[in-house]
Image: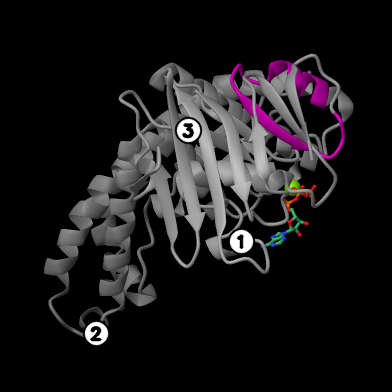
Amino acid sequence: MLVNSIETVNLRGLKDGIYKFKSGTNLILGRNGTGKTSILEAIFLTNYGDSFRTSKKLNLIKTDQNFCKIATTLEIFNSNLTVGVVIKNVTQFTLNNKTISSVLNTKTSKDSFKTLIFTPDSIASISGAPALRREMFDRYIGSLNSNYIKTLSEYNKVLRQRNALLKSEKYQGHGDKEATLQIWNLKLVEYGNKIISHRSDFIQSINPIAREFYNKISNKADNLEIMYLPNVAELSHQHLDQNIDKEIQLQNTLFGPHKDDFDVIIKSKLSKNQLSRGEQRTVGLSILFSVHSLIKEKLDLSPVLLLDDIASELDVIRVDFLMKYIPESQVIITTTEKINSDHISNIINL
Ligand SMILES: Nc1ncnc2c1ncn2[C@@H]1O[C@H](COP(=O)(O)OP(=O)(O)OP(=O)(O)O)[C@@H](O)[C@H]1O
Ligand SMILES: [Mg+2]
């Protein structure tokens, strides 16, 4: 698939216009504040219906204007599509000028428009709080398997309801505790174990690919290993029953994949918190590239890679190797400094 162009009107500080992309690696080159990230944000918005940097779409409208318009033209399996977004008081999406309720409906007969993004904030998913890592891996697993998104959302619903019950009068008093809780336990165990098994399979399948990317980009054999650290290896009724008093006391569900974590280890001993920023960035990109390669293999679709401010914090040699080993696909990179590489097909100067 290809993003052929993006047209923007009143998008943040970006100059209105049509920006055209080619296959291969595109570079958006410009000084700070010229609108490079805004272009990636606009492409992402037409793909996922949301921005990766704000939950308030109104922020995208240029100050002193009352609307913002974006149109992305795409080529998927030889058919041309235009996904449009108008942000006003409400946000309206269109597919080939017809209103659609959500961009996730942008499907061709074979599959949907897929982009994968990496921003400077993405490294927080390597070394930050466990919730950020769960969010990152969940997004990646979901991009490979839409059933996973459904299971995860069911699990979270059950979790919210179970927690509400544990906080309720009945549980803090002396009501019939068992009956209602058992219903939620059944679902918690069912969905929870599915999530654990998906996460475990996913980590197993990306490890060898991510290690190879890491070695190529860093030009070192550093033995990258991503580890899945499940809170419980398997969620069981027996375990829930045994711990119910503690859960009632703390008014919270204490066990399950909502407490999972992941670790990233290099050189067989350095854990995620010990990695330098350049190393964390290389790990994050290696994971992203391995997800790209799994999507290609499993879904026969080559997602567009959106890489924001990619060269910062990487030394020139790493940037060289990165450009050389970037997956074969359409790539859109933003940068403030020119990157010298034979692998660039198009430069957009802002
Ligand atoms: N709603 C808005 N209205 C007008 N200008 C805005 C709005 N939101 C952001 N801006 C400005 O738009 C410009 C473009 O922002 P953007 O983040 O896309 O720049 P950038 O080229 O990625 O910069 P950097 O190199 O610093 O990452 C910035 O100057 C920013 O201050
Ligand atoms: Mg930027």
Report if residue 320 lies within the magenta region. yes
- Of the two numbered discs 1 and 3 on the same chain, state the one appearing first in sequence: 1
Ligand 1 contact, mark 1 (Cβ < 8 Å): yes
Colour scheme employed for the rendering of this structure: one colour
- The amino acid type, in three-letter code, at marker 2 is Glu
Q: Residue at x 44, y 31 (%)?
A: 81
Characterize the local packing of mark 3: few (<14), some (14-19) or many (20 or more) Cα atoms within 10 angstroms: some
Q: Which residue is mark 3?
A: 114
**1 or 3: mark nearer the eye:** 1
Q: How many marks?
A: 3
Q: Residue at x 50, y 22 (%)?
A: 302
Residue in the foreground of this view, choosing between 237 and 5: 5
Q: Residue 96 at what x, y percent from top left?
A: 40, 37
Q: Say left or right for 253 vs 277.
A: left
Location of residue 348 by image quarter: top right
SS class of the residue under badge 3?
A: loop
The answer to whether marks 1 and 2 mark residues whose Cβ atoms lie closer than 8 Å is: no
Q: Say left or right for 242 vs 3.
A: left
Q: Which mark is residue 61?
A: 1
Q: Which mark is residue 169?
A: 2
- Of the two numbered discs 2 and 3 on the same chain, state the one appearing first in sequence: 3
The answer to whether marks 2 and 3 mark residues whose Cβ atoms lie closer than 8 Å is: no
Location of residue 61 by image quarter: bottom right
- Of the two numbered discs 1 and 2 on the same chain, state the one appearing first in sequence: 1
Query: In the image, which residues are magenta?
Result: 319-338
- The amino acid type, in three-letter code, at marker 1 is Ile
* C-alpha span from label 2 to label 3: 46 Å
Report if residue 151 lies within the magenta region. no
Location of residue 104 by image quarter: top left
**2 or 3: mark nearer the eye:** 3
Q: Is residue 345 visible?
A: yes
* C-alpha span from label 1 to label 3: 24 Å
